Amino acid sequence: MADLTSTATPKPKVLVADDEQVIANTLAIILNQAGFEARAVFSGEKAVESLESFKPDMLISDVIMTGMTGIEAAIITRSKLPSCKILLFSGQAATADLLEKARAQGHEFEILAKPVHPTDLLAKLRG
């Protein structure tokens, strides 16, 4: 019988960054169950630290986090892994100012409002 594991396409790797650990862990569980290889981290700094070892295909990050914002992590991610898809989410009004600042510097990111319904998130990732 043929070994099918060697011909199977690898699961897309998704790095989830949110300083609210319950949200990061829950999204990672949902994504893992949906056929992704997802890992949760709890800060922008940890997301950037994980790039080298994990090499995600996608970064999903909260915008407003203590320390490094999700936008700062996204800009670094894009510079290190240009093909990495980036999706930001936020439940705070201050996000608009941060996104505008990033746009002024030539960075464009897609953003979803919190709370994110798993169906909507999966549709964005697969789209």
Image (spheres, rainbow, N blue to C red):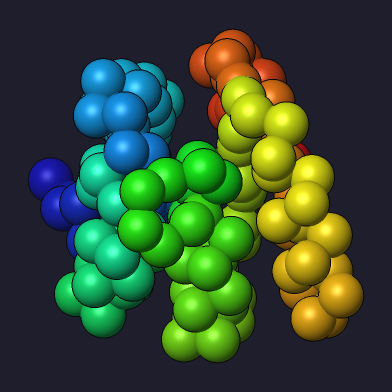
Quarter of the figure that contains the C terminus: top right
In the rendered view, would you say 92 is above or below 68?
Answer: above
Q: Is residue 60 visible?
A: no
Number of numbered discs on residues: 0
Question: Is 122 positioned to the left or the right of 19 in the image?
Answer: right
Q: Residue furthest bottom?
A: 79
Q: Is residue 67 visible?
A: yes
Q: Quadrant of residue 42?
A: top left
Q: Nearer the viewer, residue 6 or 92?
A: 92
Q: Quadrant of residue 104?
A: bottom right
Measured from the top left, where is residue 84 in percent x and y? 55, 68
Residue at 69% across / 40% down in the picture? 94
Residue at 24% across / 29% down in the picture? 21
Measured from the top left, where is residue 67 in percent x and y? 35, 58
Question: Is 113 positioned to the left or the right of 68 in the image?
Answer: right
Question: Is 71 positioned to the left or the right of 48 in the image?
Answer: right
In the rendered view, would you say 26 is above or below 68?
Answer: above
Q: Nearer the viewer, residue 121 or 12?
A: 121
Residue at 79% across / 45% down in the picture? 96
In the rendered view, would you say 102 is above or below 34?
Answer: below
Measured from the top left, where is residue 98 in percent x and y? 71, 56
Residue at 53% across / 68% down in the picture? 72
Measured from the top left, where is residue 53 in percent x and y? 19, 75
In the rendered view, would you say 87 is above or below 105?
Answer: above
Question: Is 99 positioned to the left or the right of 92 in the image?
Answer: right
